[in-house]
């Protein structure tokens, strides 16, 4: 869930890869890469609820937050 324009909404993780999962894990403090350069595994947290407000997210792996990744717009 993210807060945008005063409302909470879901981030669509469909087609996410390791980069997107790594950014979210770094942002939430649940890990990034280990000491050997291996990246965090992507996990499923189940279906979100409410309006999807961020989708089609693509990350390079260098971003500090999921909303700084490339995406077409806030919906």
Image: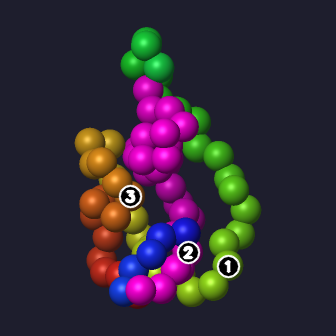
- Specify the label residue 13 is tagged with: none
Q: Which residue is mark 2?
A: 10
**Front in this rendered view, residue 29 or 59:** 29
Does residue 48 show up? Answer: yes
* Mark 3 residue element: helix
Q: Which residue is mark 1?
A: 49
Task: Please indicate whether residue 72 sits to the left or right of residue 46 in the image.
Answer: left
Residues shaded magenta: 6-33
- Residue displayed at 52% across by 80% down: 8
Q: Which of the marked residues, 3 or 2, is nearer the chain's N terminus?
A: 2
Which percent across, then down, holds residue 20?
Answer: 44, 50
Q: Which of the marked residues, 1 or 3, is nearer the chain's N terminus?
A: 1
* Mark 1 residue element: loop
Q: Which residue is mark 3?
A: 66
Task: Please indicate whether residue 74 sits to the left or right of residue 7 in the image.
Answer: left
Placement of the C terminus among the 4 image quadrants = bottom left
- Residue displayed at 50% across by 33% down: 31
Q: Mark 2 Cα within 10 Å, few/some/many (few <14, many 20+)?
A: some
Q: CA distance from mark 1 to mark 2?
A: 6 Å
* Label pair 3/2, CB-CB below 8 angstroms: no
Identify the image quadrant of residue 72. Answer: bottom left
């Amino acid at each position: 869930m993210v807060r945008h324009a005063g409302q909470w909404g879901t981030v669509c993780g469909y087609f996410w890869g390791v980069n997107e999962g790594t950014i979210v894990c770094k942002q939430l403090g649940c890990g990034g890469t280990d000491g050997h350069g291996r990246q965090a595994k992507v996990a499923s947290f189940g279906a979100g609820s409410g309006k999807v407000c961020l989708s089609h997210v693509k990350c390079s792996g260098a971003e500090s937050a999921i909303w700084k990744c490339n995406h077409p717009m806030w919906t």
